[in-house]
Image (cartoon, helix red, strand yellow):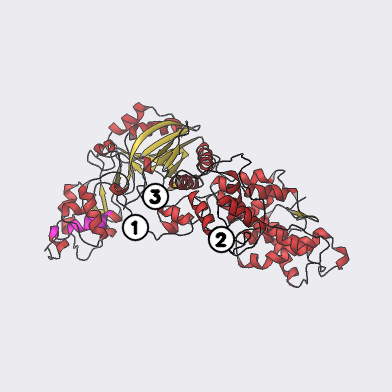
């Protein structure tokens, strides 16, 4: 019976490493026994462990998992036998070869090639060990990438902070070892959502799909074809891409003309234009005749498929989701929308982050605690000098009237203080608790929804109801304002505790301040950024890339990451016009110049 305890495997792994450091070639006996007692399977296992031991000791992840897995004395090779690659290996390799249909790249996963394997060769055990390890690594990387691990998105933009559930490499090895259909198991790491499947089909269609036509020149399986390679398949490739050999050139040589034709072919279909003809490019060459009508649409499909990898396969039977480019919140129950409403999201320079969490509390008649970002960037400049400060005039004195005008109170520790009595030359505004009590003018309105997170964002009511009439609703400092918060509260609390609309209304109307209602069952919250949706009839609905994430993601997935721009394109540059004052303020901030007036400086003060 296979050892499954990771602790047991770890102990054995450590012992095996000590033993194998002194081991000679892969056929040599372990120190306590003669070579004759080691059978072919054990010799192969030792060869595998020997090869992964050094890498596993120096690196976490795949090679460490392989060292742990194969160090178990009952470990068996998964992909090879005495004749070379087995049927399990071929099925998994075929599945990996379809990676492009799922929005990945088959060329990213190096697969073993041991055609003509001779079991009597002196190097046969080493050849089998190398093939086993190579396919292991391909399997583990495919599983990781299918669950969203292709790129650390926070390096591109800190507001791209998906909550990934990456598979544990050792668990993948242990699970795939006992599966009767390893290819199906590997495929299960792909998102299991209807919208992802719809996008997958749209991707295949956008790339031309499969065409059964005997007139198509097909490129059979074989080695990777690249610049400088001479192979008979290059002649087929020339015919397929209509690149005849120039005078004096050999048809079987992969020259610069062929490479450029391959790059054009790949780019037109939304693939990384690396100029290499591997398994993935072969499949596309053999399966399509027509060019994609819109490379940009193909790219958009790929980006939105990637975003589905950021979500768990099981979203839960009841959850809340916000799609930022759509400015829409939905409560989903058993896969169908049970409640839909409009939201206002963060401005392009105050983005609502993309992440997942769990709602824990609903607060009625809440206090608004002014965050440090607003204290520093908007409140403090208003206090200083009354307006002349921005133009270097020295100002003279402090203007603390902004607190009274906006119903704000100031506390130092637990003691409320008069802001006009503070020495603003010496005090750090971040050390003060600046807050707005509940009431008709409170910027959070009558209810807020808390799902604690490092970004300090949440959902809430608002006094600025007029913003919901706008088409482009990117107006906040990052939090999400909800058009019908009382209805949302009723929906959630009815599900969790049986509350009625009347109970929600009476709780609000009571005027009792800052009532925290803890949820008995935490509700998943998914903040998403989908710019393309496939409708039931197969048509597309697209949403504007208000934060510029599409461009940055496309560049990263093509292998050319862009530097993070803390000031992405203005909303009106990618979607529709927004308030002109806001545009001017942000543009001047980008250029390092102050706003034109104090009114401009605090134009977004209450827009959290």
| Rendered image: mark on residue 525 | none
Q: Which residue is the extreme one toward the front?
A: 247
Q: CA distance from mark 3 to mark 1?
A: 13 Å
Disc 3: which residue? 353
Q: Nearer the viewer, residue 136 or 214?
A: 214
The structure residue drawn at horizontal position 33% and vertical position 39%, both measured from the top left corner, is: 343
The answer to which of marks 2 and 3 sits earlier in the sequence is 2
Residue 175 seen from this side:
no
Could you say where residue 562 lies in the image, as x and y percent from the top left? 41, 59
Q: Nearer the viewer, residue 409 or 130?
A: 130
Q: Residues within 10 Å of mark 1 (few under 14, many from 20)?
A: few
Could you say whether the residue bearing mark 1 is in a helix, strand or loop?
Answer: loop
Residue 248 seen from this side:
yes
* Residue 596 placement: quadrant: bottom left
The structure residue drawn at horizontal position 35% and vertical position 42%, both measured from the top left corner, is: 459
Q: CA distance from mark 2 to mark 1?
A: 50 Å
| Rendered image: mark on residue 246 | 2
Disc 1: which residue? 566
In reply to whether residue 250 is colored magenta, the answer given is no
Q: Residues within 10 Å of mark 2 (few under 14, many from 20)?
A: few
Reply above or below: 403 against 228.
above
Q: Residues within 10 Å of mark 3 (few under 14, many from 20)?
A: many
Range of residues picked out in magenta = 374-387
Q: CA distance from mark 2 to mark 3?
A: 54 Å
Could you say where residue 371 lies in the image, as x and y percent from the top left? 30, 53
């Amino acid at each position: 019976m296979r050892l499954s305890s990771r602790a047991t495997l770890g102990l054995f792994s450590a012992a095996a490493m000590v033993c194998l450091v002194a081991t000679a070639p892969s056929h040599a006996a372990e120190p306590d026994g003669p070579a004759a007692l080691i059978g072919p399977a054990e010799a192969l296992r030792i060869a595998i462990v020997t090869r992964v031991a050094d890498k596993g000791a120096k690196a976490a992840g795949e090679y460490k998992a392989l060292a742990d897995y194969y160090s178990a004395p009952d470990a068996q090779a998964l992909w090879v036998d005495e004749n070379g690659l087995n049927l399990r290996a071929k099925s998994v390799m075929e599945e990996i070869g379809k990676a492009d249909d799922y929005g990945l790249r088959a060329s990213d996963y190096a697969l073993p090639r041991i055609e003509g394997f001779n079991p009597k060769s002196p190097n046969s055990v080493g050849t089998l060990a190398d093939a086993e390890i190579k396919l292991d690594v391909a399997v583990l990387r495919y599983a990781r990438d299918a669950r969203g691990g292709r790129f650390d998105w926070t390096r591109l933009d800190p507001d791209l902070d998906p909550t990934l559930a990456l598979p544990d490499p050792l668990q993948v090895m242990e699970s795939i070892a006992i599966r009767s259909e390893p290819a199906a198991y590997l495929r299960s790491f792909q998102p299991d959502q209807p919208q992802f499947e719809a996008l997958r089909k749209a991707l295949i269609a956008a790339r031309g799909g499969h065409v059964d036509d005997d007139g198509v020149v097909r490129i059979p399986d074989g080695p990777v074809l690249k610049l400088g390679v001479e192979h008979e398949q290059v002649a087929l490739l020339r015919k397929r891409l209509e690149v005849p050999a120039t005078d004096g050139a050999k048809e079987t040589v992969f020259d610069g003309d062929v490479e450029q034709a391959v790059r054009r072919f790949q780019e037109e279909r939304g693939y990384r234009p690396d100029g290499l003809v591997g398994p993935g490019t072969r499949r596309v060459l053999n399966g399509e005749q027509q060019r994609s009508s819109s490379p940009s649409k193909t790219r958009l499909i790929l980006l939105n498929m990637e975003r589905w990898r950021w979500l768990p396969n099981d979203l839960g039977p009841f959850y809340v989701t916000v799609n930022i480019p759509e400015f829409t919140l939905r409560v989903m129950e058993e896969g169908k929308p049970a409640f839909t409403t409009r939201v206002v999201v963060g401005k392009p320079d105050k983005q609502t982050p993309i992440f997942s969490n769990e709602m824990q509390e609903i607060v009625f008649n809440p206090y608004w605690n002014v965050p440090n970002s607003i204290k520093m960037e908007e409140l403090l400049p208003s206090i200083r000098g009354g307006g002349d400060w921005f133009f270097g005039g020295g100002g003279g004195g402090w203007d603390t009237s902004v607190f009274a005008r906006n119903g704000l109170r100031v506390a130092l520790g637990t003691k409320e203080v008069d802001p006009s009595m503070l020495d603003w030359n010496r005090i750090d505004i971040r050390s003060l608790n600046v807050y707005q009590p509940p009431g008709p003018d409170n910027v959070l309105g009558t209810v807020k929804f808390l799902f604690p997170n490092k970004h300090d964002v949440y959902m809430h009511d608002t006094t600025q109801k007029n913003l919901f009439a706008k088409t482009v609703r990117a107006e906040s400092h990052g939090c999400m304002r909800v058009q019908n918060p009382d209805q949302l509260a009723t929906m959630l609390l009815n599900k969790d505790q049986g509350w009625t609309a009347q109970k929600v209304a009476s709780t609000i109307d009571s005027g009792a301040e800052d009532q925290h209602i803890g949820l008995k069952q935490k509700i998943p919250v998914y903040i998403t950024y989908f710019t393309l949706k496939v409708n039931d009839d197969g048509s597309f609905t697209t949403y504007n890339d208000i934060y510029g994430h599409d461009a940055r993601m496309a560049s990263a997935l093509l292998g050319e990451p862009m530097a993070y721009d803390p000031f992405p394109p203005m909303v009106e540059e990618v979607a529709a016009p927004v308030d002109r004052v806001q545009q001017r303020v942000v543009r001047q901030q980008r250029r390092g110049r102050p706003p034109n007036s104090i009114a401009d400086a605090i134009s977004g003060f209450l827009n959290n």
